[in-house]
Image (cartoon, rainbow, N blue to C red):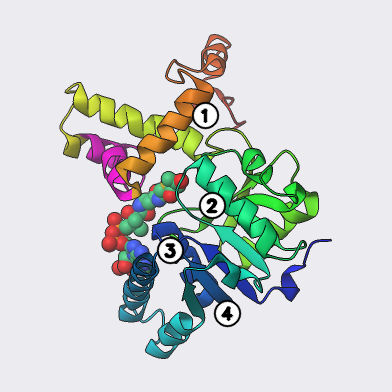
Amino acid sequence: MVRTLDSIESIGVVGAGTMGSGIAQVAARHGYDVVMRDVEEEFVQRGFDSIEDSLDRFVSKDELTEDEAEETVERITGTTDLADLADCDVVVEAAVEDMDIKRDIFADLDEAVPDDVVLATNTSTLSITTIAAATEREDRVVGLHFMNPVPVMKGVEVVVGEKTDEDVVEFAHALAEDLGKETWESDDKPGFVTNRILMPWINEGIRAYDEGVASKEDIDKGMKLGTNVPMGPLELADHIGLDICLDASETLHEELGDRYKPAYLLKRKVDAGDLGKKTGEGFYEH
Ligand code: CAA
């Protein structure tokens, strides 16, 4: 049995860093009571500070009233005790990207919250299946991968573990949509859709800079104006955090090896004369 979205009133968030505090903010902004937990009081406070900064930005643009911002913050309770999540109807974990730490958290959550509560992880590259295996509810563990900055970015990646129940997948999509997001789905393969594709792009930008192809400003400008993305690879790496990029890249490298050769399918399509829009056929029909 999985809880349906209309029975969900409170959301537990594990981790009050950039992602956790962003998720807590968005959940509270959409009317949920939130319990936001981190290991130190100081980290919890930092989470609240960043939520207040972000809400202030919406207030200054008249997208939120001061009262709404205040109510949003009031719906969030901070804690350092995982047991305080016991009454939450769903939990989203956004702690550090370390498999051992995540598995410990999931084992503890499995003890702390009722059996029918879905446990979601915001992991960006680690295996949902391996995290789920630390619990006795592998069918009720799912990936809910938010994008940074969470209050601004529209997308959420729903990641389906080996044992994730179909109802839980549906629930994850519905929950993210209720938080004002749009979703897409990925199988539990390293990096899922986004980071599998994004990390080689960022690394290539970094290598191009290191090899003197262009200045860092021109690499970012070239990719922004040349491919119409909001940030070039070096800017985006800074925005995500270089440590996070390195962790993600190391996981991908370990799992997938050398991904930088031209894709076999790309060569095959060119050989077949399927060059994209100009020939009417590429990866899509035009
Ligand atoms: N809270 C509230 N508002 C915010 C905000 C936050 N945390 N961060 C930015 N904003 C708002 C700003 O107030 C501003 O609003 P207006 O345009 O209405 O004035 C708007 O967003 C744009 O911000 P800035 O003017 O400061 O700067 P910008 O135009 O460069 O935009 C950005 C910043 C929204 C981050 C934009 O550059 C962007 O979309 N960059 C790409 C981000 C991206 O790709 N994120 C995904 C990273 S991958 C990931 O997260 C997955 C992973 O696992 C690593």
N-terminal of the pair, mark 2 or mark 4, is 4
**Is 30 positioned to the left or the right of 57 in the image?**
right
Above or below: residue 34 compared with residue 152: below
Name the residue type under label 1: Lys
Residue pointed to by mark 1:
277
In primary-sequence order, the first of circles 3 and 1 is 3
Disc 3 secondary structure class: loop
The residue most toward the top is 271
Task: Say if 245 sits above or below 22 in the image.
Answer: above
Please, what is the three-letter code of the amino acid marked with disc 4? Gly
Q: Tell me the amino acid under the disc marked 2.
A: Asn
Q: Which mark is residue 31?
A: 4
Region in magenta: 219-239
Q: Residue at x 68, y 70 (%)?
A: 89
Point out the frontmost of discs 4 and 1: 4
Ligand 1: quadrant of the figure: bottom left
Which SS class for mark 4?
A: loop
Q: Nearer the viewer, residue 77 or 262?
A: 77
Is 223 part of what is drawn in magenta? yes
Res 131 quadrant in image:
top right
Look at mark 3 in the image and give the residue it sits on: 16
**Which amino acid, mark 3?**
Ala
Q: Secondary structure at mark 2?
A: loop
Q: Quadrant of residue 177?
A: bottom right
SS label for mark 1: helix
Residues packed near mark 1 inside 10 Å, few (<14), some (14 to 19) or many (20 plus): few
Examine the image and state in which quarter residue 116 appears. Answer: bottom right
**Is 244 placed left or right of 155 in the picture?**
left
Query: CB at mark 4 closer than 8 A to ligand 1?
Result: no
Say which quadrant the C terminus sits in: top right
| Disc marking residue 122 | 2
